Amino acid sequence: MTVRPCLPWPDKRLRTPADLVDEITDEIRQIWDDMIDTMEAMPGVGLAAPQIGVMLRLAVVDGSTERGRAVRLANPEVIEASPEMRAHDEASPNLPGVSARLERPRVVTVRYLDENGMINRRAFRDLESTSVQHQIDHLNGRMYFDRLSKVKRDMLVRKARKKG
């Protein structure tokens, strides 16, 4: 079990789009395993590789109540989103101590490479939908609070700095 440290905001890697994964190797599988260990230690419902300083388009998501059902995704992309929205308080271990309520599509269909290197499609619902969209934002060099107005974003970052 390897729990990796999360990069502290405002590390520039959190603003850098991650690189595509060409193939699924044992090294990629080990990174996913470490990401799952890190996600469970937080505890959280998802993690993107750039959050731990690995600049690859890798993410893990587990919104199950019993845990141990993490979905491993490489190069995930939303290919369909429901018009119905869902509000959820989002946070990040990269900027601890603060959160913001965001609305995202309740259901998204995502295309990705799975742990066997196969192209897969999966519909994510509710909490897992929010999480996978949050992770894809990280892979694109965006933080959840980028979706807030400038005033709310500045207040959130100031609040986090006071707590830190």
Image (spheres, grey):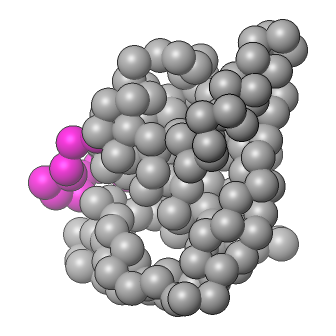
Residue 116, percent across and down?
Answer: 29, 71
**Most common secondary structure along the magenta stretch:** loop
Q: Is residue 110 left or right of residue 92?
A: left
- What stretch of residues is rendered in magenta? 18-29
x and y, in percent, of residue 121 in the image: 36, 85
Q: Is residue 133 above or below residue 18?
A: below
| Residue 94 falls within the magenta-colored stretch | no
State which quadrant residue 56 falls in: top left
Residue 111 location (% of width, % of height): 32, 77
Image coordinates for residue 16, horizontal then vertical, percent: 32, 31
Task: Give the residue at x 75% y 26%.
Answer: 155
- Mark count: 0
Q: 140 left or right of 148?
A: left
Q: Can the viewer see residue 15 in this picture?
A: yes
Q: Is residue 25 magenta?
A: yes
Residue at the (71%, 37%) spot, across then down:
152
Q: Quadrant of residue 134?
A: bottom right
The residue at the point 51 percent across, 63 percent down is 133
Q: Is residue 127 above or below residue 9?
A: below
Compared to residue 37, the image places residue 51 above or below, namely above
Q: Residue at x 59, y 18 (%)?
A: 8
Residues 145 and 34: in front is: 145
Work out whether residue 35 or residue 2 is closer to the camera in this orientation and state it: 35
Q: Specify the quadrant that holds the C terminus.
A: top right
